[in-house]
Image (cartoon, rainbow, N blue to C red):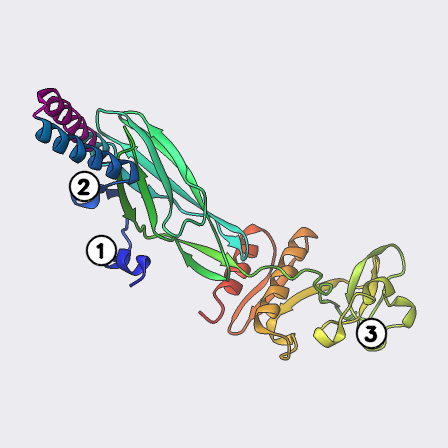
């Protein structure tokens, strides 16, 4: 049986803990480390030697060191016991970024705590060492890499200490009830925004301004060749679902932006389509454009701003969940 399976049997994961988590006596484990094991062997050897040679000073030294070991055991256990743990709300991220989980540790006892180490059980990040004064609270962030969109639950956290002599290791596991929302990773080099132009109601025909260049839009049948943006079209991959684009000049018809997931080609991978929609939402916000959004049965009317952006990105993150 592998070491990790043995750990799972001895320290079962259980259900996530909501709210504050208190490290009671039953939740703190303590065992000798390598140094502690060598110290024990040394005590046994000294005791056998003192018994064999009837050395009273040898017995006194063995009992003195054994008493020190007992005091160390108590102090090591007390250094971790009865801490109060809680976790804050993490910020949403994009797939591939590090999720930052805010963790709060409160020491309500009238004694200082020293050299407490925190990390995730799978050791994906370096340990963080903290000291906590009596009746004080410490805040820190634990980072964990994200891999795919959706809700990502926080992994199990481990706290441990070797204080004061390094002979014993006291530790505990904590699985808080917390998760972070992971948006799709925005597509790199996404096609231009699918801007369309409104019709002139009086003339019943499309107008195209010819004053100052203001951007690009999706190519529409009937656009003159001189309006094609060859600089942008050179980077368009038509096989991957890209679209030709035309130049857009100020003074012409008003542009509308409607981001509809159904218009993307089905031969393109689902995750790539979601990434493209994500990139378009970010690009529209960067340019200060108002846009409508539709993803399957979910749709929002034309708007812009942080709330509108987050609503669209959340729909992309949870699509198909």
Measured in 3D between alpha carbons, the distance from the residue under mark 3 to the one under mark 1, in whole angstroms, is: 75 Å
Q: Is the C-beta separation of discs 1 and 2 under 8 Å?
A: no
Check residue 261 for magenta coloring.
no
How crowded is the residue under tag 1: few (<14 C-alpha within 10 Å), some, or many (20+)?
A: few
Q: Answer left or right for 199 relative to 284.
A: right
Q: Nearer the viewer, residue 238 or 210?
A: 238
Q: Which residues are magenta?
A: 54-73
Q: Residue at x 55, y 61 (%)?
A: 184
- Residue depth check, mark 3 versus mark 1: number of the one nearer the observer: 1
Few, some or many residues within 10 Å of mark 2 (<14, 14–19, 20+): few
Query: Could you tell me how far apart the alpha carbons at marks 3 and 2 are, in whole angstroms?
Result: 76 Å
Q: Is residue 137 above or below residue 298?
A: above
Q: Overall secondary structure of the magenta stretch?
A: helix
Label 3 Cα neighbours within 10 Å, binned few <14 / some 14-19 / many ≥20: few
Q: Position of residue 6 (x, y in %)?
A: 26, 58
Between disc 3 and disc 2, whose residue precedes? 2
Kindly state the secondary structure of the residue where label 3 is placed. loop
Q: Which residue is mark 3?
A: 205
Q: Secondary structure at mark 1?
A: helix
Question: In the image as oriented, which residue stretches furthest toward the front?
Answer: 53
Viewer-nearest residue: 273 or 198: 273
């Amino acid at each position: 049986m592998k070491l990790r399976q043995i750990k799972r049997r001895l320290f079962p994961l259980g259900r996530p803990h909501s709210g504050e988590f208190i490290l009671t006596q039953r939740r703190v484990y303590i065992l000798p480390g390598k140094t502690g094991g060598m110290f024990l062997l040394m005590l046994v050897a000294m005791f056998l030697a003192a018994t064999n040679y009837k050395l009273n000073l040898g017995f006194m030294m063995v009992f003195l060191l054994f008493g020190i070991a007992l005091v160390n055991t108590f102090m090591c256990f007390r250094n971790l016991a009865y801490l109060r743990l809680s976790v804050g709300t993490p910020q949403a991220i994009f797939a591939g970024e590090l999720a930052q989980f805010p963790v709060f540790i409160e020491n309500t006892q009238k004694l200082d705590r020293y050299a407490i180490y925190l990390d995730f059980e799978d050791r994906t990040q370096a340990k963080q060492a903290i000291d906590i004064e009596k009746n004080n609270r410490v805040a820190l962030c634990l980072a964990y890499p994200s891999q795919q969109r959706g809700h990502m639950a926080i992994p199990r956290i481990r706290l441990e200490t070797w204080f004061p002599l390094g002979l014993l290791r006291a530790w505990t596991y904590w699985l808080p009830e917390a998760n972070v929302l992971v948006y799709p990773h925005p597509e790199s080099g996404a096609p231009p925004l699918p801007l369309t132009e409104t019709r002139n109601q009086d003339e019943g025909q499309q107008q195209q301004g010819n004053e100052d260049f203001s951007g690009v839009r999706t190519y529409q049948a009937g656009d003159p060749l001189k309006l094609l943006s060859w600089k942008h079209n050179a980077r368009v991959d038509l096989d991957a679902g890209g679209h030709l684009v035309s130049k857009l000049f100020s003074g012409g018809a008003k542009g509308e932006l409607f981001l509809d997931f159904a218009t993307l080609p089905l031969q393109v991978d689902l995750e790539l389509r979601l990434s493209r929609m994500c990139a378009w939402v970010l690009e529209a916000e960067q340019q200060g454009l108002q846009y409508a959004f539709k993803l399957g049965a979910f749709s929002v009317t034309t708007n812009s701003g942080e709330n509108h952006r987050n609503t669209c990105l959340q729909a992309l993150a949870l699509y198909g969940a």
